[in-house]
Image: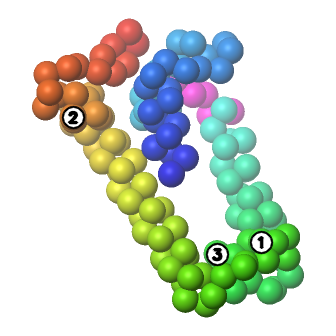
Amino acid sequence: MLAVVGHLVTSAGVRFPGMEEMPTGIAALSKLAPDDIIPIFATCGILELAIMKDAKGTGETPSDFRNGMFKWNASEEEKRSKYSIELNNGRAAQMGILGLMVHEQLNNEPYMINAFLGYPSHFNEAF
């Protein structure tokens, strides 16, 4: 879900200071040095191995990382419904970012609705 939001935000021109010339999407990977990519993988590894886990062993589901921080005030049926909704939203976001990446590689126009309506998005045009 964050990948789709990040793609939209950077496509709108929002950048961190000093990164104004960084292109959007997959093209940004070509501008990164190997030393820039190592911290990304290290951060993901630390999150997977040390932080994002059921530390107390009390999780109700495989992805329950609350670790006792708050309690659900819902019935079992509502919990299952909310869990299913979140799982489906995550799957939809994965398909969304995959679609953006594929269309970016096909014709450098990830936002197909713009092309359908005749409004080019000028995606990475300046780069």
Give the residue type that dot 3 points to: Ser
Give yes or no for contact between labels 3 and 2 (Cβ–Cβ under 8 Å): no
Q: Which residue is mark 1?
A: 66
- Rendering quarter of residue 47: bottom right
Give the residue type that dot 1 points to: Arg
Q: Nearer the viewer, residue 102 or 63?
A: 63
- Is 74 positioned to the left or the right of 111 in the image? right
Label 1, secondary structure: give it: loop
Q: Give me the residue at 50% from left, 45% from top.
A: 3
Q: Which residue is mark 3?
A: 63
Give the residue type that dot 2 points to: Ile
Residue 53 visible? The answer is: no
- Is 119 positioned to the left or the right of 76 in the image? left
> Please, what is the dominant secondary structure of the magenta stretch?
helix
Report the span colored magenta: 31-35
> For the residues marked 3 and 2, what is the alpha-carbon distance in whole angstroms?
34 Å
The crowd level at tag 3 (other Cα within 10 Å; few <14, some 14-19, many 20+) is few
Q: Nearer the viewer, mark 3 or mark 2?
A: 2
- Is 7 positioned to the left or the right of 80 in the image? left
Q: Nearer the viewer, residue 107 or 113?
A: 113
Q: Give me the residue at 22% from left, 28% from top.
A: 114
